[in-house]
Image (cartoon, rainbow, N blue to C red):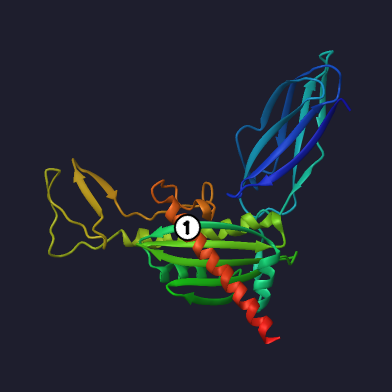
């Protein structure tokens, strides 16, 4: 073969798939006009960028890689990604090579509840692949967020246990993928700090490929529920004792209550402008969620929030260790 083709993929924390195709020139002369044409299922993936990537000329024994970013539009299991490579050899003869298909699978697993005892949950949590993610909310209480998380997980995860440490809420959930029966565990720590509700999620599974999709789907649905509630609250109620008079498109006096004095509506020249000083703050992994260690992008608060998340997770680890010591003493 004049060229060697290798392909592979990586699932990013935001659940996008980076698919790479590396071309190596095995000849002693330069090959030219090298192009990689990706072939994917458009009903399952949205390609970010162009289908055709030009690598131009490749010297002898030198590898060049074409990278494609694919956004899954749903759950993906064992889907083939194909490609065609075209180039011209030193005689300017055109060559067309078909890449062997590559499976992309378990990006976002189908889950169902899996009942288990707390001891089994803690044991599996220590042995699987794990990732962590954090998200902040404002405008809702910790009780609201706990309720929303329970709703989000209701159809796919089993509630192993829910308890409090001081003002912090800790929840354990367990599930398994349909068909493959791989386990997926979720530990949630919910903490309030100066009006901000911080949620740290730790996902664990014995199937590495599906874990990013698992935690990102939970975060996306949780955010959607909080956004929906906050949006409905912002509609507000116009108090009877406060009158809005609009004369000749100029506001004489206006006050709209939203239950939050930080939000205001100004009407000027017949155009409504809205400023919200206390809108919900979401700080997710990459585009939608960020690692818990980077939960706040603010330079001013980064260290304090990082320490809070670290303390929350350390409390979880201490609880696991205490349980282990308790079991040992009983024996």
User: Of all residues shown, which one is farthest toward the bottom?
Assistant: 330
Check the picture and name the quadrant holding the C terminus: bottom right
Check the picture and name the quadrant holding the N terminus: top right
| Residue 59 drawn at (x, y percent) | 78, 20
| Residue 97 found in image quarter | top right
Is 206 on the left or on the right of 99, as rendered? left
Q: Residue at x 72, y 52 (%)?
A: 105
| Residue 305 drawn at (x, y percent) | 44, 56
* Number of marks in the rendered image: 1
Residue beneath disc 1 = 307
Rendered position, 145 above or below 48: below
Q: Residue at x 11, y 43 (%)?
A: 248
Task: Between residue 159 and residue 102, name the one nearer to us.
Answer: 159
Is 107 on the left or on the right of 163, as rendered? right
Rendered position, 297 above or below 116: above
The crowding category of the residue bearing disc 1, from other C-alpha atoms within 10 Å (few below 14, some 14 to 19, many at least 20), is few
Q: Residue at x 66, y 37 (%)?
A: 68
Rendered position, 288 above or below 328: above
Is 230 on the left or on the right of 102, as rendered? left
Judge whether residue 158 can be spotted in this image.
no
User: Of all residues shown, which one is farthest toward the top?
Assistant: 91
| Residue 137 drawn at (x, y percent) | 41, 59
Rendered position, 24 above or below 160: above
| Residue 328 found in image quarter | bottom right
Task: Between residue 98 and residue 215, name the one nearer to us.
Answer: 215
Q: Which residue is drawn at 57% across and 56% down?
A: 216
| Residue 242 drawn at (x, y percent) | 13, 60
Judge whether residue 280 can be spotted in this image.
yes
Q: What element carries label 1?
A: helix
């Amino acid at each position: 073969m004049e060229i060697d083709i290798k392909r592979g993929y990586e699932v990013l924390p935001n659940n996008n798939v980076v698919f790479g195709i590396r071309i190596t020139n095995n000849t002693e002369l330069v090959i030219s006009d090298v192009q990689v044409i990706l072939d994917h299922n458009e009903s399952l993936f949205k390609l970010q960028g162009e289908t055709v990537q030009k690598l131009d000329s490749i010297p002898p024994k030198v590898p060049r890689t074409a990278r494609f970013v694919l956004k899954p539009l749903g759950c993906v299991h064992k889907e083939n990604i194909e490609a065609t490579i075209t180039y011209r050899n030193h005689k300017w003869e055109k060559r067309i090579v078909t890449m062997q298909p590559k499976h992309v699978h378990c990006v976002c697993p189908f889950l169902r509840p899996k009942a288990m005892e707390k001891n089994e949950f803690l044991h599996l949590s220590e042995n699987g692949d794990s990732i962590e993610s954090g998200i902040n909310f404002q405008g809702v209480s910790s009780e609201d967020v706990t309720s929303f998380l329970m709703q989000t997980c209701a159809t796919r995860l089993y509630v192993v246990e829910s308890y409090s440490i001081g003002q912090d809420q800790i929840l354990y959930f367990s599930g398994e993928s349909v068909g493959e029966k791989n386990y997926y565990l979720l530990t949630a720590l919910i903490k309030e700090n100066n009006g901000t509700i911080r949620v740290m999620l730790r996902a664990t599974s014995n199937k590495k490929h599906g874990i990013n999709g698992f935690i990102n789907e939970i975060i996306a649905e949780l955010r959607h529920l909080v956004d929906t509630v906050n949006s409905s609250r912002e509609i507000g109620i116009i108090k009877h004792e406060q009158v809005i008079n609009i004369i000749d498109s100029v506001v004489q006096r206006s006050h709209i209550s939203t239950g939050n004095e930080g939000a205001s509506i100004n009407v000027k020249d017949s155009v409504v402008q809205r400023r919200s000083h206390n809108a919900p703050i979401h700080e997710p992994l990459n585009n939608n969620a960020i690692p818990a260690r980077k939960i706040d992008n603010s330079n001013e608060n980064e260290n304090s929030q990082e320490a809070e998340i670290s303390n929350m997770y350390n409390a979880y680890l201490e609880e696991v260790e205490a349980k282990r010591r308790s079991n040992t003493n009983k024996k």
